[in-house]
Amino acid sequence: MIAIALDGPAGAGKSTVCQAVAKQLGIIHVDTGALYRAVGVYALRRGVDTADWPGVIALLPDIHVSLRFTGEGQRIYLDGEDVSQAIRQPEASMAASNVSAIPQVRDFLLDLQRDLARRGSVIMDGRDIGTVVLPDADVKIFLTASPQVRAARRYNELKEKGHDVEYEAILAEVRERDYNDSHRAAAPLRKAPDAWVCDTTDMDLAESVRLIIEHIKERMGS
Ligand code: DC
């Protein structure tokens, strides 16, 4: 069994890199951001402002979130409904960022995440995996890139999907989410002291994946 923790800011390419690494190593990729997005979507659907902490906390006992892993990756369910698409809508990003600042929400999702790592080999991505969720992970990676490059990647991705977007607006959103994620009191985005930093500012996906696999193999002594 192996547990790999991969953290980093929004848009660093965590999901894409993890999917490729998981496939090559034959392990499961757990995208923990999806859990916060699901809580955010649940609150939006119930008409609760995601910045209203007591309002969101009051919903927690009613939220049933679960993950399933398929050959094509992770699917996420709210009360048995597949919300894998819904959590990718733009409004879900800010909702997730808001609810992820609430300590009770983080506690609510903690056991679920730890349980997944207990059941099999995983590469888990998020913001606090190496620091809080899996502090004893075998390998810890902090994946990052400059805000400009992360915004440009997001811009190209949205353009390709036919969305009418502006680079400056996306860059502003990237900076805002970075600020929110790293300045909240509960489990802020922070590099674990023993994490290896992989800066992909000047790298493409293939090169990032190759370097990360090399690092994992080195750490595992094979
Ligand atoms: O990685 P993402 O964009 O899907 O994450 C959505 C939000 O959830 C993001 O604002 C940060 C938060 N998050 C978190 O606080 N802790 C995690 N382990 C994963 C995500």
Image (spheres, grey):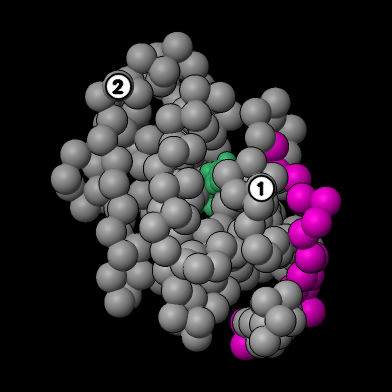
Secondary structure state at the residue bearing disc 2: helix
Is 38 displayed left or right of 153 in the figure?
A: left
Horizontal and vertical percent position of residue 33: 49, 49
Looking at this view, is 172 or 84 the one in front?
A: 84
Tell me the quarter of the picture where residue 119 sits. Answer: bottom left
**Front disc: 1 or 2:** 1
Looking at this view, is 192 or 88 the one in front?
A: 192
Q: Looking at the image, is mark 1 or mark 2 earlier in the sequence?
A: 2
Specify the label residue 135 is tagged with: 1
Q: Is residue 70 above or below residue 218?
A: above
What is the three-letter code of the residue carrying label 2? Answer: Pro
Q: How far separated are the C-alphas under marks 1 and 2?
A: 27 Å
Specify the label residue 180 is tagged with: none
Specify the label residue 61 is tagged with: 2
Does residue 154 appear in the picture of this structure?
A: no
**Residue 115 within the magenta-colored segment of the rendering:** no
Farthest top residue in view: 54
Q: Is residue 89 above or below residue 78?
A: below
Horizontal and vertical percent position of residue 11: 62, 60
Q: Is residue 6 above or below residue 174?
A: below
Horizontal and vertical percent position of residue 1: 50, 68
What is the three-letter code of the residue carrying label 1? Answer: Pro
Is 220 displayed left or right of 30 in the figure?
A: right
Q: Residue at x 77, y 50 (%)?
A: 192
Does residue 58 appear in the picture of this structure?
A: yes
User: Which segment did they paint magenta?
Assistant: 188-206
Tell me the quarter of the picture where residue 2 sits. Answer: bottom right
Q: Residue at x 67, y 87 (%)?
A: 222
Q: Is residue 20 above or below residue 53?
A: below
Horizontal and vertical percent position of residue 123: 53, 65
Secondary structure state at the residue bearing disc 1: loop
Q: Residue at x 24, y 42 (%)?
A: 78
